[in-house]
Image (cartoon, rainbow, N blue to C red):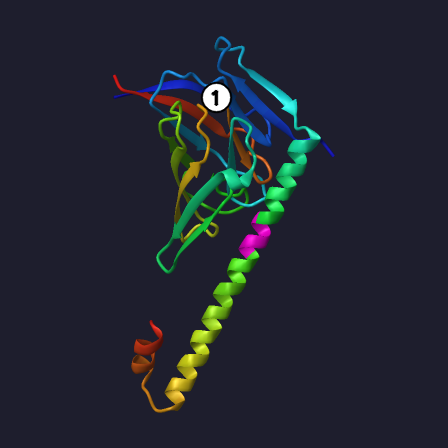
């Protein structure tokens, strides 16, 4: 199994969306990593749109969130993909969202798992995971990552393919 | 106010020529606003439900202890 960097970009300015277009079709899975923060006019939420499909009812996800005092699980038909720490929060941890999208060229529904860690006070941490599915049989050719507010300048996004060899 | 922009990385092009920054369309801006509103409403509803559940539990504990149960006994009934 190999993991191959397709592209990495660092934002020169605050940006409302990052879109990978014409995704190579020669991988088994895709792996995405975003390190950075989101602006204060939103919250930590990052949404996804595959092939420009923004219809929430075509997506379904379970979201888990846990710290040392509480755990919550919510499910819904929407495009929640994960999150990044909001700028202004005093999180000392690195702020990285990672995601794996399975069998992205297949002709059945596409599943994905994402995870990230955040803190809003610098002393307590919250670990979050999303398991989701996009109900569409088309190969994924475009991936848009859309935060509430903006991704801040200097955030870095990378796309990899995972291959069999 | 500056129009929000998106970064498009066209992977069919050679490295170094892939990135372009374009303004969001009116449709994309409207979608963002609708998503944010739906998210805020869902979160408010979830927080209301959690608050109501916590209040019901506290009320049940108070009533059970008023009947003479210890706090541990009451917690065993309503769940810790």
- Residue B46 lies left or right of residue B27; in this view the side is left
Of the 4 image quadrants, the one containing the C terminus of chain A is top left
- Residue B63 lies left or right of residue B19; in this view the side is left
The residue drawn where x is 38% and y is 59% is A70
Magenta stretch contains residue B46: no
- Residue B4 lies left or right of residue A8; in this view the side is right
Q: Residue A85 placed where, x, y %?
A: 48, 42
Identify the subunit bearing mark 1.
A
Q: Picture quarter containing residue B22?
A: top right
Is disc 1 placed on a helix, strand or loop?
loop
Which region shows up in magenta? B39-43
The residue drawn where x is 48% and y is 21% is A141
Q: Pointer 1: residues within 10 angstroms few (<14), some, or many (20+)?
A: some
Question: Would you name the residue on which mark 1 appears?
Answer: A141
- Near-viewer residue (B79 or A88): B79
Above-or-below relation of A143 to B79? above
Q: Residue B8 placed where, x, y %?
A: 56, 21
The residue drawn where x is 30% and y is 80% is B72
Res A121 seen here: yes
């Amino acid at each position: 199994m190999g993991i191959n960097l397709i592209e990495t970009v660092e934002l020169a300015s605050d940006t409302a969306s990052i879109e990978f277009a014409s995704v190579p079709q020669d991988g088994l899975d895709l792996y995405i990593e975003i390190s950075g923060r989101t602006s204060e006019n939103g919250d930590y939420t990052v949404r996804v749109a595959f092939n420009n499909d923004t219809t929430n009812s075509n997506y379904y996800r379970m979201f888990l969130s846990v710290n040392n005092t509480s755990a919550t699980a919510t499910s819904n038909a929407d495009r929640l993909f994960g999150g990044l720490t909001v700028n202004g929060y005093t999180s000392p941890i690195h702020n990285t969202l990672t995601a794996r999208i399975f069998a992205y060229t297949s002709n059945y529904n596409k599943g994905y798992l994402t995870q990230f860690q955040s803190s809003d006070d610098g002393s307590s941490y919250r670990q979050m995971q999303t398991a989701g599915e996009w109900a569409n049989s088309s190969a994924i050719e475009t991936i848009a990552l859309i935060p509430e507010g903006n991704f801040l300048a200097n955030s870095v996004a990378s796309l990899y393919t995972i291959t069999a060899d | 106010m500056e129009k929000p922009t998106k970064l498009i990385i066209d992977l069919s092009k050679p490295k170094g020529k892939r990135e372009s920054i374009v303004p969001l369309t009116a449709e994309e801006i409207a979608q963002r606003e609708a998503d944010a509103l739906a998210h805020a409403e869902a979160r408010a509803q979830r927080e209301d439900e959690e608050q109501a559940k916590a209040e019901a539990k506290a009320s049940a504990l108070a009533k059970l202890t008023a009947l003479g149960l210890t706090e541990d006994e009451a917690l065993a009934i309503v769940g810790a």
